[in-house]
């Protein structure tokens, strides 16, 4: 398996002084799906944003053989597609079709080719019928699938999904998990949803205080860190 | 909800909807110049232009009573200045000011009602309007409703905890001060949320290779019909004014 991502000693401090990442080492191979677990504020999303070049910290980030930095930014963003937590923030164009084609037009494709590829991507996520609709008319699950189409259309090698199940009901979560499992790309999934991670990911890493505390199989990490709603430690009494 | 209210007034497209935005903007520009520079026999000119605009509304299948009502939105501002003119002894100028602003607003409303905002903004861009300003306008249109929903959710949360979404300026004494402080605080939170959302949208755009320019899928075509409309509408406006001035 080819190595797609290699991160060594990544550190990042926000302007307000918060040390969000404090020496993260991470690898991702092709075809692999990794869940990022950890408490709120542990550095998962900050780390995910480094993979797409949205943030730049100290240390080394290598994506598909490209060293992350200003010179490779465009190429890296072509390799890593990022789906944000709130799909409303990602769907900013007047229609679904225009939104999905947004990245392609930025790459310089002509309108006809961008339209054709955007329609194909919508077809792939089962949203072809929504092409002419305004994004704000869609349900949360539909928005998420359209946001995913907007990323898939760029043909990335790696998908980074930040809290993909937020706002989704259980059937919509199942549809999304099924869709993700059919995609060949390597995936990094930031999530608190352990059942979803079990369905989609092969392994998990656990973030604590800006560091990776441990990594292993999803089940193993969930058990070790008691990271499941219905864990053995939980004792609900009614 | 806000968007739902707005779209409740949606109507089937008329002939004006099918025209290129640039053609409508060119005609609008000529009409606005005709209105603003008219001074001789203005009541007659205003009547002729009003008839022309009313006919355009009917032709465009824009509900005339609604158009007339919406154009009146400008009156509270201009009536004040018209009243000042009236009181200073220049009643004719006051009437002209009110009529000019109303007719201009009616013409603008007609164009806005028959042109989707993205097409309108592209039209402005081709007329040389600053791209950044147009980008801001597009985002305001897209997210105004999202922010309104957030404000509504915050108001609901306040009501659920025994607060009130209204009445920041009602009551008296300490209660009024507390309500005013709470409203100001809520506004600050709403601003902070909007700021955070703007930051996230910008990141989402950068992640998909945004380089500062919004590109569009459909390249608008300026056809013969568009040119003919711009020419005819402009000539009609100029002709109506000249005829009214000659007859008066």
Image: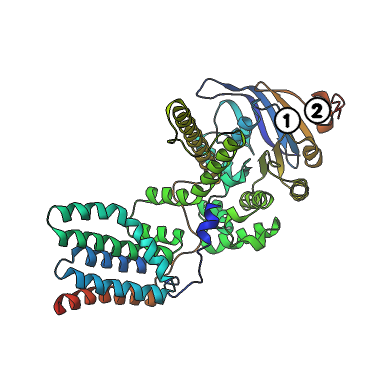
Residue A22 coordinates in the image, percent (x, y)? 62, 20
Q: Is residue B124 above or below residue A8?
A: below
User: Which quadrant is the C terminus of chain A positioned in?
Assistant: top right
Residue B29 lies, in percent from the top left, at 28, 64
Which residue in the rendered view is the most extreme toward the front? B172
Q: Front-most of A36 and B155?
A: B155
* Marks 1 & 2, CB-CB < 8 Å contact: yes
Q: Chain of mark 1?
A: A
Residue at x 44%, y 62% (from the top left corner): B119
Q: Residue at x 30, y 77 (%)?
A: B232
Cα separation between marks 1 and 2: 9 Å
At 40% across and 69% down in the image, what residue appears?
B65
Residue tagged 2: A221
Q: Disc 1 or 2, which lies upstream in sequence? A: 1
Whether residue A198 sits left or right of residue A48 in the image: it is: right
- Residue A37's disc is 1
């Amino acid at each position: 398996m080819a190595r797609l991502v290699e991160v060594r000693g990544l550190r990042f401090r926000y302007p307000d002084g918060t040390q969000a990442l404090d020496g993260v080492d991470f690898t991702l191979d092709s075809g692999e799906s990794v869940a990022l677990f950890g408490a709120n504020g542990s550095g998962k999303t900050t780390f995910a944003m480094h993979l797409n070049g949205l943030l730049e910290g100290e240390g080394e980030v290598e994506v598909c053989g490209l060293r992350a930095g200003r010179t490779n930014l465009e190429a890296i963003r072509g390799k890593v597609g990022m789906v944000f937590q709130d799909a409303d923030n990602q769907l900013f164009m007047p229609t679904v079709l225009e939104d999905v084609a947004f990245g392609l037009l930025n790459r310089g494709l002509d309108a006809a080719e961008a339209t054709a590829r955007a329609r194909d991507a919508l077809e792939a996520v089962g949203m072809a019928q929504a092409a002419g609709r305004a994004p704000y008319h869609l349900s949360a699950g539909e928005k998420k699938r359209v946001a995913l189409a907007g990323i898939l259309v760029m043909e990335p090698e790696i998908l980074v999904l930040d809290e993909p199940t937020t706002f989704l009901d259980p059937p919509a979560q199942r549809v999304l998990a099924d869709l993700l499992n059919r995609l060949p790309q390597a995936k990094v999934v930031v999530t608190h949803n352990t059942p979803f991670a079990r369905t989609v990911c092969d392994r998990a890493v656990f973030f604590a205080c800006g560091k990776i505390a441990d990594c292993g199989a999803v089940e193993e990490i969930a058990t070790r860190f008691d990271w499941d709603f219905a864990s053995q430690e939980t004792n609900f009494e009614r | 909800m806000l968007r739902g209210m707005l779209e409740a007034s949606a109507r089937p497209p008329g002939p004006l909807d099918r025209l290129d935005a640039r053609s409508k903007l060119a005609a609008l520009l000529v009409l606005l110049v005709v209105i603003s520079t008219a001074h001789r026999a203005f009541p007659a000119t205003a009547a002729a232009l009003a008839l022309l605009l009313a006919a355009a509304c009917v032709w465009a299948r824009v509900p005339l009573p609604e158009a007339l009502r919406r154009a009146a939105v400008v009156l509270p501002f201009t009536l004040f200045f018209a009243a000042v003119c009236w009181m200073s002894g220049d009643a004719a100028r006051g009437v002209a000011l009110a009529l000019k602003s109303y007719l201009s607003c009616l013409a603008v409303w007609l164009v806005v009602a028959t042109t989707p905002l993205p097409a309108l903004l592209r039209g402005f861009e081709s007329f040389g309007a600053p791209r950044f300003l147009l980008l801001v306008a597009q985002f305001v249109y897209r997210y105004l409703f999202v922010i309104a929903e957030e404000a509504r959710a915050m108001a609901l949360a306040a009501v659920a905890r025994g607060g009130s979404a209204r009445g920041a300026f009602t009551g008296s004494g300490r209660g009024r001060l507390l309500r005013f402080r709470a409203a100001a605080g809520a506004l600050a939170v709403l601003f902070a949320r909007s700021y955070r959302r703007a930051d996230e949208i910008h990141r989402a755009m950068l992640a998909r290779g945004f380089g500062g320019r919004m590109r569009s899928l459909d390249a608008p075509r300026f056809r013969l019909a568009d040119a003919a409309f711009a020419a005819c509408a402009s000539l009609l406006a100029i002709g109506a004014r000249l005829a009214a001035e000659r007859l008066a």
